[in-house]
Image (cartoon, helix red, strand yellow):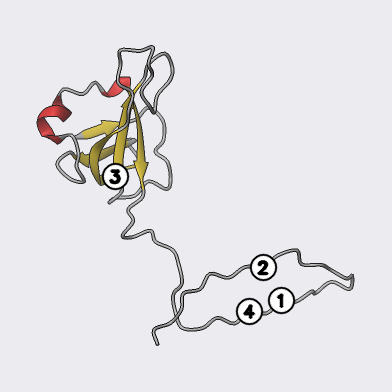
Amino acid sequence: MTIEFFRHINISCQVGDTAYASYHSGRQSGRNHPGSSVNTKPFVLGRITNINRITGSIEVNPNADGGVGNTVAAGLVLSQLYIFFQKSQLANTSGVVGYFLETEYRNYSTLPAEMFATAADYVESSK
C-alpha cells in the first residue's frame, strides 16, 4: 500500500518503523469519544518498507506487524486518517554498551562554576 502525503515526511521516519492511523471525529483523534459514532482508536497499518522523500510517499506492508491486511487496506480512505509511526525497537534501542565508563568534567572558564546534576545508567555485570 502506498501512502502519499501533501507535506514532507517527518525526518525521523525510517524503513522498518510501524505505521499507525486513526480516524478523525470533530477534529479529534487518538482515542474513542463517547459522543461520536466514529471509532478513533489508533490501529496498525503495517511496517514501512520504502520511503520516497522526493515524492512525499511511503510504502507500507499491511500484512506485517499486525497490520490491517491487504483487503482492509484497500477500503481505507487515506484522506480521512491521521497517520503516524512508531520507531522499530530492534534498531532504535538505547542503554549501556561496554564494560566501563570514565568521565571528566572541566571548567575552561576563569570563573567558578557549579554543576547541578549528573547521572549515569548502569547494569550490574554478570558475576
- Circle nearer the N terminus (2, 4): 4
The residue under label 3 is 18
Callouts 3 and 4 close, C-beta under 8 Å: no
Residue at 32% over, 53% down: 88
The residue under label 4 is 103
The residue under label 2 is 118
Q: Specify whether 81 is left or right of 63.
A: right
Callouts 1 and 4 close, C-beta under 8 Å: yes
Type of residue at label 3? Answer: Thr
- Circle nearer the N terminus (3, 1): 3
Callouts 3 and 2 close, C-beta under 8 Å: no
Residue at 14% over, 26% down: 74
Q: Nearer the viewer, mark 2 or mark 4?
A: 2
Give the residue at the far right of this rendering.
Answer: 111
Type of residue at label 2? Answer: Thr
Q: Nearer the viewer, mark 3 or mark 2?
A: 2
